[in-house]
Amino acid sequence: MHLNSGSFPIATAPGFETMADDLLTYGGSEPVVWTAGGQQPVTIRAIVRQFSAKVETALQTVSKVGISSILVAAMDVPGLQPGDLFSLRGATFRVADGGVWPDGFAMVKVEVTEVYP
């Protein structure tokens, strides 16, 4: 069953308080800016997940690389909701509807879609 932050609070489980720091320190994280609805932007660390898709047509083959999700510390994003924004790598991304997946311990997978000007 899929639950999002509207269904329950995003929290860190007792005994796992330093897990997110360890993952973000040694897991290749980078700074991202989170803007919750109507709030001031906040810089946090995230592990950025990319995807690669290959599209073949009769004339050419094109590879597209994009960002599909980010992994953030639960304690950094209390109240994270679909529609919130993340800025990273020179682009803006919106949290997808149903795209907030807390792991129940210390991290939250956030599915995002790029916002085009």
Image (cartoon, rainbow, N blue to C red):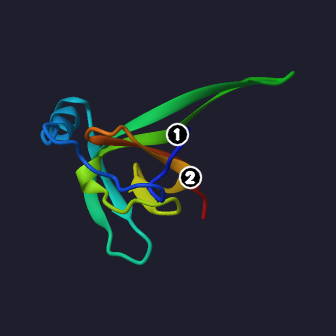
Closest to the observer, 8 or 111: 8
Question: Pointer 2: what residue?
Answer: 96
Looking at the image, residue 37 sits to the left or right of residue 17; the answer is right
Label 1 Cα crowd, 10 Å radius (few <14 / some 14-19 / many 20+): some
At a point 33% along the width and 40% down the height, the residue shown is 104
Q: Which marked residue is nearer to the observer: mark 1 or mark 2?
A: 2
Measured from the top left, where is residue 47 in percent x and y? Answer: 33, 38
Q: Which residue is mark 1?
A: 68
Residue at position x 60%, y 64% in the image:
117
**Corner quadrant of residue 29:** top left
Q: Is residue 15 left or right of residue 61?
A: left
Q: Nearer the viewer, residue 20 or 42?
A: 20
Separation (CA) of disc 1 from disc 2: 10 Å
In this picture, is 69 found above or below 75?
Answer: above
Counting the numbered discs, the total is 2
Q: Position of residue 103 (x, y in %)?
A: 36, 37
Query: How far across and how far down the image is residue 95, in percent?
Result: 50, 55
Amino acid residing under circle 2: Ala
Q: Is residue 36 above or below residue 24?
A: below
Q: Which amino acid is tagged 1?
A: Ser
